[in-house]
């Protein structure tokens, strides 16, 4: 036991885990999106021969996190991960008895920075999420076998998106991810557009897909509600609310992206004739919430509905004429009362009240006191996320009430935000 303890301490504090090079074996990581962001939640080990002992307690995992773009806080750079379960599998982590691979399921939670393969950092004059160097050393304690050579990454749902496209409009180039439903001979499919928040800009659309679980719109439990839907996730090179002057606009100035973004959407629809142009839905959170509303304001007859979380557009900059032009556009807002980033009293509350005052009948606001762990598991009972993270209720399809707490109804039946969205037509 003392020898093992010394070995563990050595691993934890040697920056390069150098001693493990003597007997390296291969592993893959599986990265999934959670309500708080992505986490490495499984490791697939390549076995040269069967292990006599292969329970969770027979393994130790040490992690080193580093970044080329900036500094990671010292307490988040290295440490130990906990294994909670193991099972025989194929090379992709699918359960398979007698397979030549073993998958380790790791403990994850919203406060565990060591689980994340990305890091929020300030680079240049803005903050954002970036992929980092994520190195693992897995030890089978009884045999001293070591795995420290990563051979691949599996990202469920994200791997189903096309991540390669670029779209150019004048002097702007936008990256985007797209998902297409399984082709069929049935009627045309709708298009779900998701616009990311401020920290997910750049040229790598895996960041907006995983940064706050937006890839979930391609999940079966969402897709089945729409009978299959295209999903389009554009990415701003910087942030959607960037003004002509390079600062943030909250509706008081023009942003630099809305024209290029709408051109991208039109181009994507034109290139995918299976899209039902009467069922194009636009939504986003924070920065993306601003841009969703901006697109609806600019093109009120184009979109079938909007679904907007943590709206960043300030209501004081909306004219009565603009409000009248969108009062008949179906919209469902999601916000938390304790959002200190996009304060509801400046954004969604006056907008909702004004739209209702103008007679808007198909506009809803799911309003929460706090953003809580809806699973009751990962963060624990009564765990609170930052109040800005109200998009969790949209991605997980759990928003179901209007501002007064009453259920949103369609044909006498209570519905969730995605069930409602799937019924909307232009």
Image (tube, helix red, strand yellow):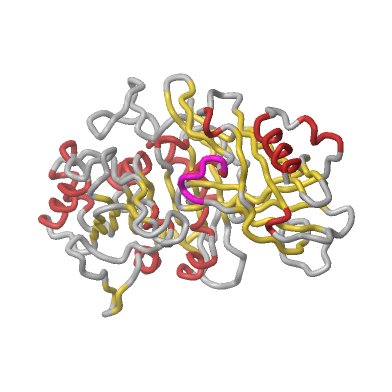
Q: Nearer the viewer, residue 67 or 359?
A: 67
* Up/down of 127 relative to 54, above or below: above
In the picture as drawn, the residue positioned furthest to the bottom comes out as 412
Above/below status of 58 relative to 244: below
Q: Which residues are magenta?
A: 109-114
Q: Is residue 267 left or right of residue 248?
A: right
Residue at the image position 43 percent from the left and 60 percent from the top:
396
- 217 left or right, relative to 18: left
Q: Quadrant of residue 4?
A: top right
Q: Residue at x 12, y 55 (%)?
A: 358
Q: Say which of 425 and 374 sits in front.
A: 374
Percent coordinates x, y for residue 43 in the rendering: 69, 51
- Residue ID at (22%, 47%): 348
Residue 404 percent location from the top left of the image: 17, 63
Instruction: Tell me residue 30's x, y (percent).
Output: 65, 51
- Where does the C terminus fall, quadrant-wise? bottom left
| Position in image of residue 294 (x %, y %) | 31, 42
Q: Inspect this view and state whether residue 269 appears.
A: no
Is 264 covered by the magenta stretch? Answer: no
Please tell me whether residue 121 is drawn above or below residue 312 in the rendered image: above
Residue farthest to the right? Answer: 49
Magenta span contains residue 111: yes
One can see residue 68 in this view: yes
In the foreground, 199 or 377: 377
**Prevalent SS, magenta region:** loop
């Amino acid at each position: 036991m003392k020898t093992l303890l010394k070995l563990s301490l050595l691993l934890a504090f040697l920056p390069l885990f150098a001693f493990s090079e003597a007997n390296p074996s291969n592993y893959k990581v599986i990265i999934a999106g959670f309500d708080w962001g992505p986490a490495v939640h499984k490791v697939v080990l390549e076995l040269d021969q069967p292990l006599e002992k292969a329970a969770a307690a027979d393994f130790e995992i040490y992690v080193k996190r580093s970044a080329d773009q900036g500094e990671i806080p010292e307490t988040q750079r290295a440490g130990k991960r906990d294994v909670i379960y193991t099972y025989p599998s194929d090379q992709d982590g699918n359960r398979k008895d007698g397979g030549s691979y073993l998958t380790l399921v790791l403990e994850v939670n919203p406060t565990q920075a060591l689980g994340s393969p990305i890091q929020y950092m300030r680079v240049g004059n803005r903050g954002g999420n970036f992929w980092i160097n994520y190195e693992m050393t897995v030890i089978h304690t009884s045999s001293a076998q070591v795995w420290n050579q990563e051979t691949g990454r599996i990202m469920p749902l994200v791997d189903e998106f096309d991540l390669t496209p670029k779209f150019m409009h004048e002097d702007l180039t936008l990256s985007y991810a797209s998902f297409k439903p399984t082709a069929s001979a049935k009627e045309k499919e709708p298009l779900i557009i998701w616009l990311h928040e401020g920290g997910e800009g750049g040229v790598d659309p895996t960041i907006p897909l995983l940064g706050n679980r937006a890839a979930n719109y391609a999940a079966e439990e969402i897709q089945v509600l729409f009978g299959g839907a295209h999903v389009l996730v554009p990415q701003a090179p910087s942030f959607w609310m960037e003004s002509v002057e390079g600062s943030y606009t909250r509706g008081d100035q023009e942003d630099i992206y809305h024209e290029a973004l709408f051109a991208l959407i039109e181009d994507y629809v034109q290139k995918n004739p299976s899209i039902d142009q009467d069922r194009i839905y636009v939504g986003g959170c924070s920065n993306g919430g601003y841009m969703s509303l901006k697109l609806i304001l600019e093109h009120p007859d184009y979109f079938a509905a909007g679904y907007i979380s943590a709206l960043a557009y300030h209501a004081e900059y909306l004219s009565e004429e603009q409000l009248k032009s969108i009062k008949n556009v179906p919209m469902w807002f999601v916000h938390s009362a304790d959002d200190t980033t996009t304060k509801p009293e400046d954004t969604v509350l006056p907008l909702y009240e004004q739209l209702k005052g103008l007679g808007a009948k198909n506009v809803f606001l799911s309003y929460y006191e706090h953003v809580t762990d809806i699973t009751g598991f990962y963060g624990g009972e009564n765990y609170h996320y930052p109040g800005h993270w109200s998009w969790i209720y949209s991605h997980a399809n759990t928003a179901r009430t209007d501002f007064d707490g009453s259920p949103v109804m369609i044909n006498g039946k209570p519905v969730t935000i995605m069930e409602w969205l799937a019924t909307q037509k232009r």
